[in-house]
Image (cartoon, grey):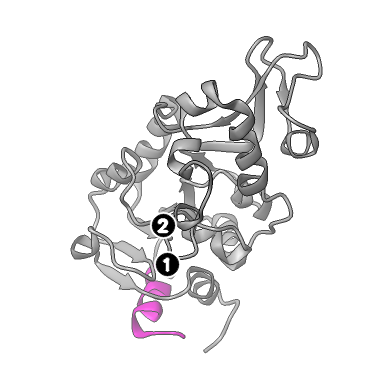
Amino acid sequence: MITENTKILKSWIEESDNIVFFGGAGVSTESGIPDFRSVDGLYNMKYKFPPETILSHTFFCNHVADFYEFYKDKMLNLDAKPNKAHLALAELERQGKVRAVVTQNIDGLHQAAGSQVVYELHGSVHRNYCVNCGKLHDAKYMKDYDGIPACSDCGRLLKPDVVLYEEGLDQRTVNGAIEAIEQCDMLIIGGTSLSVYPASGLIDYYSGNKLVLINKSSTQYDNRADLLIAESIGETLSYCVGESEE
């Protein structure tokens, strides 16, 4: 559904050449990847341990077999393809409008769609390193490995390059995201509840007057938005690049 606010967003995008998109799990749900907090999200599924516990540094250290059983089953969605939102953002980057994508997602779908400047706040499932020698392994190696993944060189434990609970964000990535947001004239936020810190605090670095929130449910920052759109991110952004019609 194309609303009046969606039409306004399209006109703003046409007028801008310095946009940053900041997205969360809701960007990838249209690719079939479950989010965390919705009714069908990971946090509402029943496991032997709560997902928040499983995806913590302490749990990884103390229950590595259980960690990898969940991780390989629920976090390695390697058959997922970029959806309309990913493709539209990549096209807007090619047009010189989107300068950076800041994402809380770890699925790599923005890069798969063609986006070049992507700040992955929570890391990526596509990078996995040996805790001993540092050798990198791809996501397919992890998915196909029978049991606890071990380094192909030294045989020691592999750890995904993703930020688990109790771990800090990579400061270089955070600094890059902050700089991009400080300099942009338009910040589009989509598919995130804006409830996870410190990532949600990035909104405070935007000082412009074109803050757009695209989210089907309300957030604590709705009152700060200059434009609110409660529609599909994929359909909304596709319309804005002229790839779908009313």
Query: Which residue of the protein is positioned furthest toward the left in this rendering?
Result: 223
Sort mark 2 into few (<14), some (14-19) or many (20+) by Cα contacts within 10 Å. Answer: some
Residue 118 image offset from top left, x and y in percent? 53, 43
Residue 220 image offset from top left, x and y in percent? 23, 58
Q: Looking at numbered disc 1 in the image, what kind of residue is underneath it?
A: Ile
Q: Secondary structure at mark 1?
A: helix
User: In the rendered image of this protein, does residue 202 appear above or below residue 45?
Assistant: above
**Quadrant in the rendering for residue 131:** top right
* Discs 1/2, front: 2
User: In the rendered image of this protein, does residue 45 appear above or below residue 197?
Assistant: below
Residue 231, magenta (yes or no): no
- The residue at the point 23 percent across, 58 percent down is 221
Q: Main secondary structure of the magenta part?
A: helix
Determine the CA span between mark 1 and mark 2. Answer: 30 Å
Residue 144 image offset from top left, x and y in percent? 80, 38
Residue 192 visible (yes or no): yes
Q: Looking at numbered disc 2 in the image, what kind of residue is underneath it?
A: Arg
Residues in magenta?
Answer: 1-13
User: In the rendered image of this protein, does residue 125 appear above or below residue 26?
Assistant: above
Residue 11, magenta (yes or no): yes
Instruction: Tell me: 145 left or right of 72.
Output: right
Instruction: Tell me: 64 left or right of 19.
Output: right
Residue identified by numbered label 1: 13
- The residue at the point 59 percent across, 51 percent down is 110
Instruction: Tell me: 142 left or right of 116.
Output: right
Residue 218 image offset from top left, x and y in percent? 29, 67
Query: Which residue of the protein is positioned furthest toward the front in this rendering?
Result: 48
**Quadrant in the rendering for residue 21:** bottom left
Residue 97 visible (yes or no): no
Give whichever of discs 1 and 2 has the lower sequence position: 1
Instruction: Tell me: 162 left or right of 128.
Output: left
Residue identified by numbered label 2: 37
